Image (cartoon, grey):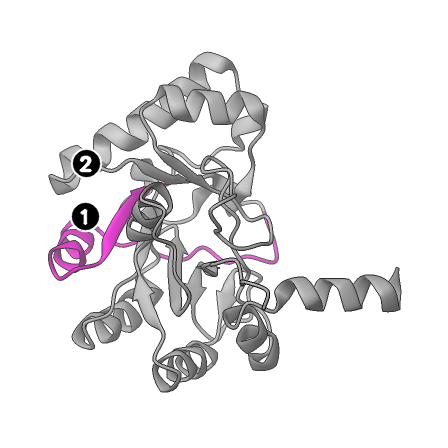
């Protein structure tokens, strides 16, 4: 009998609202996704717990990670609901815009300005069990900036998380998922153990820990279930055969 490779699906969310922005998911769809995970008794891990499992060679099936980039106020009630069910998630915070908005999108017509949580709000969620990770300082495309600026973005993001919330972090989600070898080297040099991208795939024992894949969430429930059950590889093969 063929042994299945243990794998953890990690999903990335931004805003939970009904605006139909390209970064927004309907709270109703999020509730459907959560209900499915609860019904099937999947355990929700934080991103940090999944990274620990990777290093300890303890990755197991039946775990799912929910990550939220940018810390929008629109996710707060859904995170609260998760925490009341003794479940967890990870919020990746860009420290220069705490209490402001997604200023990096200000010139984009298809994305509204959405309020970002204040540090007090994030601290309260963190104290209740929601993990906070770094998302750089000002959310640039890391492959496009000068090496000194890259170092500053990575180090400042990490330092300010500690200053704001009194907790150290060694995980980061790259803004836009944007990374290359230079970015990974700088990330490791800045003291991070793991970096999260927006490439498609699972966290497995063979994953590159500074380029951990995450799945998008603007998908129908059928594809969400397929990913959760570890079937994304088969789906890709079928897609490739059908559509080349």
Task: Residue 40: give its label.
Answer: none
Task: Residue 119: give its label.
Answer: 1
Which residue is labeled 2 in the image?
A: 168
Please state which of the two labelled residues, at mark 2 or mark 1, is closer to the viewer: 2
Q: Residue furthest bottom?
A: 39
Q: Nearer the viewer, residue 23 or 46?
A: 46
State how far apart marks 2 and 1 are (Cα): 15 Å
Q: Earlier in the sequence, mark 2 or mark 1?
A: 1
Q: Nearer the viewer, residue 175 or 101?
A: 175
Magenta segment boundaries in residue numbering: 108-134
Callout 2: few (<14), some (14-19), or many (20+) C-alpha neighbours within 10 Å? Answer: some
Q: Residue 39: name its quadrant.
A: bottom left
Q: Is residue 123 magenta?
A: yes
Which residue appears at 51% of the width and 38% of the height?
208
- Is the residue 214 above or below the residue 161 in the image? below
- Percent x, y of residue 210: 46, 35
- Is the residue 13 above or below the residue 94 in the image? below
- Percent x, y of residue 92: 35, 47
* Secondary structure of the residue carrying numbered label 2: loop
Q: Nearer the viewer, residue 103 or 61?
A: 61
- Percent x, y of residue 67: 39, 57
Callout 1: few (<14), some (14-19), or many (20+) C-alpha neighbours within 10 Å? Answer: some
Report the label total.
Answer: 2
Q: Quadrant of the C terminus?
A: bottom right
Q: Residue furthest front?
A: 1
- Percent x, y of residue 233: 66, 62
Which residue appears at 78% of the width and 68% of the height?
238
């Amino acid at each position: 009998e063929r042994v299945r490779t243990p794998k953890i699906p990690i999903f990335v969310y931004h805003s939970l609202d009904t605006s139909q922005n390209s970064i927004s998911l309907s709270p109703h769809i999020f509730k459907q996704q959560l209900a499915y995970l609860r019904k099937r008794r999947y355990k929700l891990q934080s991103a940090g717990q999944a990274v620990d499992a990777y290093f300890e060679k303890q990755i197991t099936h039946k775990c799912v990670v929910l990550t939220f980039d940018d810390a929008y106020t629109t996710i707060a009630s859904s995170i609260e609901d998760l925490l009341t069910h003794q479940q967890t998630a990870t919020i990746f915070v860009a420290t220069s815009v705490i209490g402001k908005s997604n200023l990096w999108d200000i010139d984009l017509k298809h994305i509204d300005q959405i309020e970002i949580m204040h540090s007090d709000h994030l601290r309260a969620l963190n104290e209740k069990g929601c993990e906070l990770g770094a998302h750089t300082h000002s959310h640039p495309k890391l492959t496009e900036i000068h090496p000194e600026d890259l170092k500053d973005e990575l180090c400042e993001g990490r330092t300010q998380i500690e200053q704001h919330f009194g907790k150290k972090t060694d995980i980061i989600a790259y803004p836009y998922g944007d990374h290359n070898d230079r970015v990974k080297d700088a990330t490791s040099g800045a003291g991070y153990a793991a970096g999260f991208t927006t490439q498609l795939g699972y966290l497995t024992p063979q994953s590159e820990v500074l380029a951990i894949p995450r799945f998008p969430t603007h998908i129908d429930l059928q594809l969400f279930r397929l990913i959760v059950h570890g079937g994304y590889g088969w789906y890709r093969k079928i897609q490739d055969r059908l559509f080349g």
